[in-house]
Image: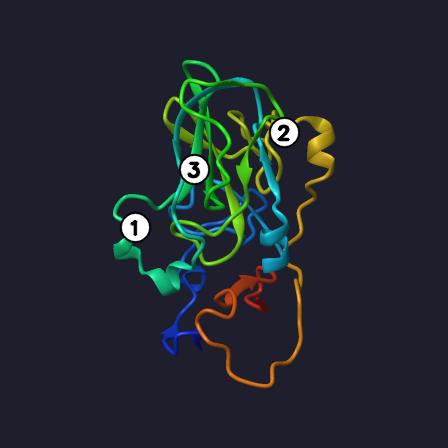
């Protein structure tokens, strides 16, 4: 177990070292109480360019939120969120039992309204950093009868530490989402200590189940 100083000068201990929660491959790419799948951007340049978020399936927009700033929760503080942890967000109802949520969207990017009918592939907004987020990413969550469902597993689990018998992803999409235990997004040197507003907070991401870790920016 260990700790590291964040970009505000505070000492932080990675919560993933303190949990036994595992992803669908029995790896450590998750943590307690996380209910969705995260797709992250590599840099602030990607945020500025605008990465579109698309509806996963046909449905009707149930709720939206926009107007929250794209700022790390390490700077903003969780108390400032007041029940708005998802940040700028869209919720779509697909049937009486299924719905999906798209969270942490970029401020001013939400492109749909409550009651609007959308098709698979409709642009909902852009990936951002709003809400309870420490890095640029989309939090994609699927719920069945108000309970979260892992899209890599579906409603019927398969063998231990593997895909479910009927994953929710279409076959062509699943091929584009291979399981990668870790990866280095970027590396480099700085000629001065970073200030809180110079970039993203440092995040530690597990490399493997043996306890080794990589440093992500």
Query: Label 1 near label 2: C-beta < 8 Å?
Result: no
Question: In the rendered image of this protein, does residue 1 appear above or below residue 101?
Answer: below
Q: Nearer the viewer, mark 3 or mark 2?
A: 3
Q: Earlier in the sequence, mark 2 or mark 1?
A: 1
Q: Earlier in the sequence, mark 1 or mark 3?
A: 1
Q: Residues within 10 Å of mark 3 (few under 14, many from 20)?
A: many
Whole-percent x, y for residue 209 in the image: 57, 59
Whole-percent x, y for residue 120 in the image: 61, 22
Distance from Cα at disc 3 to Cα at disc 2: 21 Å
For the point 55% across and 85% down, which residue is it?
Answer: 192
Label 3: which secondary element:
strand
Quadrant where the N terminus lies? bottom left
Label 2: which secondary element:
loop
Question: In the rendered image of this protein, does residue 165 appear above or below residue 110?
Answer: above
Q: Which quarter of the picture shows residue 65?
A: top left
Q: Residues within 10 Å of mark 1 (few under 14, many from 20)?
A: some
Label 1: which secondary element:
loop
* Residue furthest bottom as drawn: 191
Query: Label 2 near label 3: C-beta < 8 Å?
Result: no
Identify the residue position indicated by label 2 in the image. 169
Quadrant where the C terminus lies? bottom right
Whole-percent x, y for residue 76 in the image: 34, 60
Q: Earlier in the sequence, mark 3 or mark 2?
A: 3
Distance from Cα at disc 1 to Cα at disc 3: 13 Å
Mark drawn on residue 81: 1
Identify the residue position indicated by label 3 in the image. 89
Q: How is the image coloured?
A: rainbow
Q: Nearer the viewer, mark 2 or mark 1?
A: 1
Whole-percent x, y for residue 12 in the image: 39, 71
């Amino acid at each position: 177990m260990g700790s590291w100083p964040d970009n505000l000068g505070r000492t932080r201990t990675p919560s993933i070292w303190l949990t036994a929660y595992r992803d669908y491959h029995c790896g450590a790419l998750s943590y307690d109480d996380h209910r969705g799948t995260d797709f992250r951007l590599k840099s602030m340049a990607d945020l500025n360019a605008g990465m579109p978020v698309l509806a996963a399936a046909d449905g009707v927009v149930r709720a939206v939120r926009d107007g929250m700033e794209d700022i790390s929760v390490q700077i903003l503080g969780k108390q400032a969120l007041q029940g708005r942890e998802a940040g700028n967000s869209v919720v779509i109802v697909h049937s009486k039992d299924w719905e999906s949520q798209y969270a942490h969207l970029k401020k001013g990017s939400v492109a749909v309204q409550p009651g609007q009918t959308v098709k698979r592939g409709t642009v909902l907004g852009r990936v951002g950093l709003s809400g309870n987020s420490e890095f640029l990413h989309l939090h994609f969550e699927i719920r069945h009868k108000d309970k979260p469902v892992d899209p890599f597993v579906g409603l019927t689990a398969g063998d231990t530490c593997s895909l479910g018998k009927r994953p929710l992803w279409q076959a062509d999409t699943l091929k584009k989402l291979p399981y990668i235990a870790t990866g280095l997004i970027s590396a480099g040197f700085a000629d001065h200590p970073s200030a809180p507003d110079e970039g993203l907070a440092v995040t530690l991401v597990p490399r493997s189940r043996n306890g080794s870790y990589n440093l992500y920016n």
